[in-house]
Amino acid sequence: MDVTSSETRHQLCRIGVLISGRGSNMLALADAVRDGRILKAEIAIVISDQSGAAGLHHAAERGLETLAIERRQRAREEHEREIIAALGARGVDLVCLAGYMRLLSPLFIEAYRGRVLNIHPSLLPAFPGLDAQQQALHYGAKVSGCTVHFVDEMLDGGPVITQRVVPVHDDDTEETLSARILIEEHQAYPEAVERVVRGDYKIFGRRVIYLYER
Ligand code: GAR
């Protein structure tokens, strides 16, 4: 799968980041682009469905273009059409969900098929949906972690790009476990995006196979 169009293949991969809140994964991606850990890419825009999202402020401080497209009281598809138009106007090749807390409709998935990534704070398919860290604690899991995956129509369901394991400690609370997982998220997401931008993988069924092991 090639996330760049023929016009942009020799140029930079333009990344659009969707957030809803604090935006620490968005900043991890922005740092990785800035530091050259994700080559041949740039953050084209950061969009939030919440105008009060702290991440919008952090992104603007970095000099990134930001846009709030409020979801409140709007039908999902109408809301998404506006997001798709904003991404399209900026020539976005790859969409990274970074704490974007609204399920994407088939309309969005079709518009960016194979070009939407998400990070989720559990080892999928365990604990999809909301409050994944709390789910892991309630279940009594001894390990949890994070997953970066392609997004398809299923909730937290597309092919897995990378996962990182985090132990669950006996005295963990949702806050301590979330904080330990978040450290790994900030490593895993840039690594996964770098691989996708380089395109050195193939997808067989659900399996993302790297062509060159590191
Ligand atoms: C992260 O832990 C991310 O994995 C999670 O929301 C948090 C966002 O934090 N995403 C989901 O649960 C998606 N299902 P951030 O705004 O600081 O990146």
Image (tube, grey):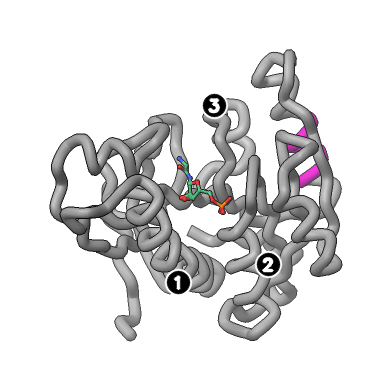
Q: Residues within 10 Å of mark 3 (few under 14, many from 20)?
A: some
Q: Which residue is mark 2?
A: 13
Judge by depth and name the residue closer to the eye, 46 or 3. 46
Q: Is residue 183 left or right of residue 96?
A: left
Q: Residue at x 68, y 67 (%)?
A: 13
Judge by depth and name the residue closer to the eye, 97 or 22. 22
Q: Residues within 10 Å of mark 2 (few under 14, many from 20)?
A: many
Q: Residue at x 39, y 31 (%)?
A: 154
Tell whether position 84 is magenta.
yes
Per the model, the C-alpha gap separating discs 1 and 3 is: 29 Å
Label disc, if present, on residue 187 of the rendered structure: 1
Estimate the x, y position of residue 199 in percent, counting from the top left.
49, 69
Main SS, magenta residues: helix
Judge by depth and name the residue closer to the eye, 92 or 60. 60
Estimate the x, y position of residue 208 in percent, counting from the top left.
32, 59
Comes first in the chain, label 3 or label 2:
2
Q: Residues within 10 Å of mark 1 (few under 14, many from 20)?
A: some
Quadrant position of residue 51: top right
The number of numbered discs placed on residues in the rendered structure image is 3
Q: Which residue is mark 3?
A: 106
Q: Secondary structure at mark 2?
A: strand
Per the model, the C-alpha gap separating discs 3 and 2 is: 24 Å
| Label 1 C-beta lies within 8 Å of the nearest ligand 1 atom | no
Q: Are marks 1 and 2 in contact (CB under 8 Å)?
A: no
Estimate the x, y position of residue 196 in percent, counting from the top left.
49, 66
Q: Is residue 5 left or right of residue 45?
A: left
Give the residues in magenta: 82-87
Per the model, the C-alpha gap separating discs 1 and 2 is: 20 Å
Estimate the x, y position of residue 137 in percent, counting from the top left.
23, 42
